[in-house]
Image: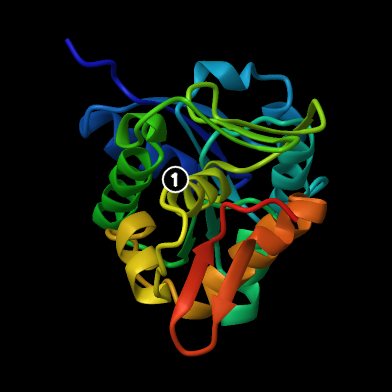
Amino acid sequence: MAEVPHILLVDDDKSISEILTFNLENSGFEVDTAYSAEEALEKNFTDFQILLLDIMMGGMSGLKLAEKLRNENIHIPIIFLTARDTEDDMLTGFTAGADDYISKPFSVKEVIARIKAVLKRTAPFAEQMTGNRIELNQLIIDLKTKEVFIAGEVIAFTKTEFELLSLLAGNPGTLYSRERIIERLWKETPYITERTVDVHIARIRKKLKEYGDLITSRTGYGYQFNDTTP
């Protein structure tokens, strides 16, 4: 029997939380709630498959909570719920480590569809790859444990960042257009723009430090990974 996805919903609006919890549980999910980021931090995040997180809350914001989780190498998928819906707001959310971003007001059906899309997209990515490790000098991409090492140091990547890096590094020399990357990683997620891909690539390059130059771009075409060490 398949495991029931366990969701942690963090929103300081109790009425929204109650409505979402009722509908999500009726759709087959298990839901825990927290009414602040501080309360959420008391939870064991390994108990959950996904985090629904309001951005604007009293006390610690959802953005700060997401950044804290990523800095602590906690890679639970995050979907932001927010009334802020400009492109810059969305990119700020993705930069903080979000896997998706839903603008208020939203329909419950949309939330459920987006949760299912993120769960599908962030399923064990190693199953789509051949072999368990990619090694280039002191850079190691472990497809089994979903970790990246540089000179023995673990480098924190979000699930989406790891999937994008694995896609490129697992197919060295293959040129991926932004459209093709979106199709692979965000197929069922609307409102993803080519700029979102560029933001993720920039973050990955920065985290790879001296190995960032392994990811190259061709203007008007896209990105590729070169399997020669710098």
Q: Position of residue 105 (x, y in %)?
A: 42, 67
Bin the neighbour count of mark 1 within 10 Å (Cα to Cα): few under 14, some 14-19, many 20 and up.
many
Q: Residue furthest top?
A: 1
Q: Position of residue 107 (x, y in %)?
A: 30, 60
Q: Where is 142 relative to 193, above or below?
A: above
Which residue matches tag 1?
170
| Location of residue 203 (image quadrant) | bottom right
Please state which amino acid type lies under the numbered disc 1.
Answer: Gly
- Front in this rendered view, residue 100 or 198: 198
Q: Residue furthest bottom?
A: 220
The structure residue drawn at horizontal position 75% and vertical position 56%, both measured from the top left corner, is: 230
The structure residue drawn at horizontal position 30% and vertical position 64%, both measured from the top left corner, is: 183
The structure residue drawn at horizontal position 29% and vertical position 19%, both measured from the top left corner, is: 4
Q: Position of residue 176 (x, y in %)?
A: 40, 68
Q: Position of residue 136 (x, y in %)?
A: 65, 40
Q: Is residue 85 visible?
A: no
The structure residue drawn at horizontal position 37% and vertical position 66%, both measured from the top left corner, is: 182
